[in-house]
Image (tube, helix red, strand yellow):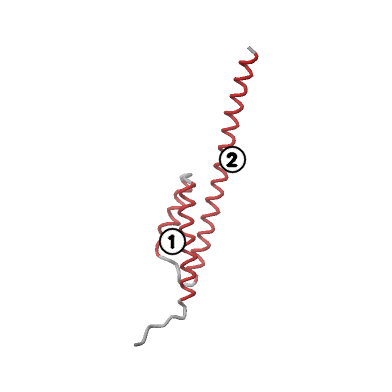
């Protein structure tokens, strides 16, 4: 009888600890998604400040990343935010490289 009670108690503890860790994992994922979205916004805003923002960075990827984070789909939110951040960084780099570009004269 004692063995059965101890087995049930152990099983409950394992189940409850699994529920507790699920909440912690979700909090970590939410924080990671939030950080990725903030980094993407900063990169896109930096590119926009010198007119180097790429077309899809804000309207497509960043907007969808925020929507996915709101729906608690943190993996998708992080992926989309990373794409937006990449486009922001590359847009800034491209604009800086081409700021003194002039038309070709044959």
The span from disc 2 to disc 1 (Cα, nearest Å) is 31 Å
Of the numbered discs 2 and 1, the one sitting upstream in the chain is 2
State the quadrant of the N terminus: top right
Q: Name the residue under label 2.
A: 24
User: Does 14 appear above or below 57?
Assistant: above
The location of residue 9, given as percent across then percent down, is: 62, 21
User: 58 and 89: which one is in front?
Assistant: 89
The residue at the far top in this view is: 1
State the quadrant of the C terminus: bottom left
- Residue at 50% x, 59% y is 40
- Residue at 54% x, 47% y is 30
Residue 68 - label? none
Left or right, residue 94 beside residue 28 = left
User: 83 and 70: which one is in front?
Assistant: 83
Q: Mark 1 points at which residue?
A: 57
User: Does 27 appear above or below 11?
Assistant: below
The part of the image, by quadrant, that contains residue 60 is bottom left
User: Does 101 appear above or below 22?
Assistant: below
User: Does 46 appear above or below 7?
Assistant: below
The part of the image, by quadrant, that contains residue 24 is top right
Say few, some or many: other residues with alpha carbon within 10 Å of mark 1 (under 14 / 14 to 19 / 20 or more).
many
The location of residue 17, given as percent across then percent down, is: 60, 32
């Amino acid at each position: 009888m004692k063995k059965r009670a101890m087995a049930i108690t152990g099983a409950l503890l394992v189940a409850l600890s699994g529920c507790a860790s699920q909440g912690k994992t979700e909090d970590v994922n939410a924080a990671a998604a939030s950080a990725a979205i903030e980094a993407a916004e900063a990169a896109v805003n930096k590119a926009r400040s010198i007119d180097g923002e790429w077309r899809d960075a804000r309207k497509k990827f960043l907007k969808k990343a925020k929507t996915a984070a709101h729906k608690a789909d943190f993996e998708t939110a992080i992926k989309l935010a990373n794409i937006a951040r990449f486009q922001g960084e590359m847009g800034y780099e491209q604009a800086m490289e081409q700021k003194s570009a002039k038309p070709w004269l044959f």
